[in-house]
Amino acid sequence: MKRLIIKNGIVADPLSRTEVKRDICIEDGIIRGAGNGTGDFKKSRSADIKIINADGLYVLPGLIDMHVHLREPGYEYKETIKSGMEAAVSGGFTSICCMPNTNPPNDSASVNNYIINKSKEAGLINLFPIGAISRGLKGENLSDIGELKESGAVAISDDGNPVSDTSLLARAMLYAKTFGLPVISHSEDLSLRGKGVMNEGFTSQALGVAGIPSIAEEIAIERDIGLAKYYGAKLHIAHVSTAGSVDVIRRAKKEGVDVTCETCPHYFTLTEESLLNYNTNAKINPPLRTGRDILAVKEGLVDRTIDVIASDHAPHSEDEKDTTLDNAPFGIIGLQTLLPLTFKLYAEKRLFLHDIARLVSQNPARILNLSGRGGIKEGYAGDITIVDVRKKWKFSENKIKSLSKNSPFIGMDFTGIAVYVIVSGNVISAN
């Protein structure tokens, strides 16, 4: 029997909403005890027992990033499944979910199986693929949703491409409902976005570039929620960025619509002014918004309107980003910066650490039906993230594990970092 004992750590548990010093025992990859002392865990030492002294550290259920772009197959020069997993380990994640906009797109069992097999070869953390809503991500014909579910997909999405055909999205919701899958929507009206490259407002005018109005996101969310309400489907809104979007989702939840949503750290950290020097590494879609939007997103996290914090990790090569603001692709990397940026909300006393565990572990597991994950409880998977909330460090380019370096946070000083990632009882040093 293989046993791991984590001693003296402060367990930030979203299930009990507590932060209490407890010891945890993991046997053969499963949590078998989480008490106030080692108690029954104390047995004679042997070669199959490993002990981690987590004194002064916080112990969280294994973190889950439910929105990651790994690029493989097809774009391995940007990221591979292995390099993405290495970045995830450094960021403190025990599980990640990869979006289907690869080449070919993940719209079939064959691509799904390829991704799963490559993740097993890497042998680092758990990977759960998200299948495409439409074949080829073209928004014209539905993928075989049943086949995707059977081969391991945990949700469906055309992320990167909003499903503009309302009838197609409605049918996707009905099929997904049948198979118990959430629909993850990239909610955006493309006709309103036009050729915009950043938030529409004073800054875009000052830079002389086309803007993306906030209503392009909000009106699409209104449509998607209307469909979910009508069909009784399970809807998850990706990367919420505006105050209006938060209000729309808050109202829908009060009406009982089965809708959840996520935001990303850049939407409660950076404003559109990050692009004032034409910084393509701050070009993302949805775009960085205003200070008012940042405050609204923070409030949405505090009042539980927003369920999840995800990275939307979107690697691009230096050559692709080293161009004009108009021509550069949307997207930034985020696996290694999600946790320290979220710790800023802890420092601001907006969130407890058990709230962070809820937003980055419990709720992703619940939304994606990842049973036995998202908490520290007997019988759950032995997936644990151990963090040092006091460690000061700088996010320098040489610390980036991703193959791509497109981050607006390079050079930023952080407080808080993952120390260990434990996957099914196997300990990996994170940093």
Image: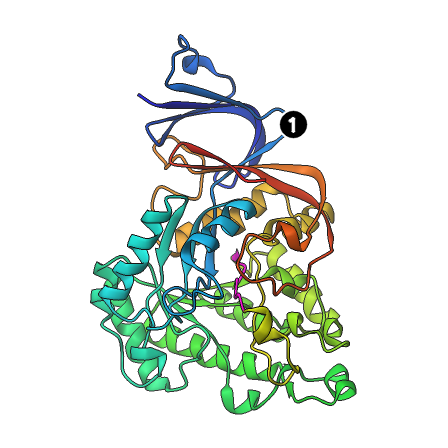
Element under label 1? Answer: loop
Check the picture and name the quadrant holding the C terminus: top right
What is the magenta segment's predominant secondary structure? loop
Question: Which amino acid, by three-letter code, is at mark 1?
Answer: Gly
Name the residue: 50% across, 65% down.
254
- 401 and 249: which is toward the camera: 401
Does residue 70 appear left or right of residue 322 in this picture? left
> Where residue 429 appears, x then y in whole percent?
53, 36
Q: Is residue 270 left or right of residue 258?
A: right
Q: Quadrant of residue 137?
A: bottom left
**Relative depth, front residue between 404 and 302:** 404
Q: Residue 43 in the image: x percent, y percent?
A: 40, 10
Is there any visible trace of residue 286 in the rendered image? no
Is residue 184 highlighted in magenta? no
- Above or below, 74 against 142 in this view is above
Residue annotated with mark 1: 56
Q: Which residues are magenta?
A: 308-316
Label 1: how many Cα within 10 Å (few below 14, some 14–19, many 20+)? some
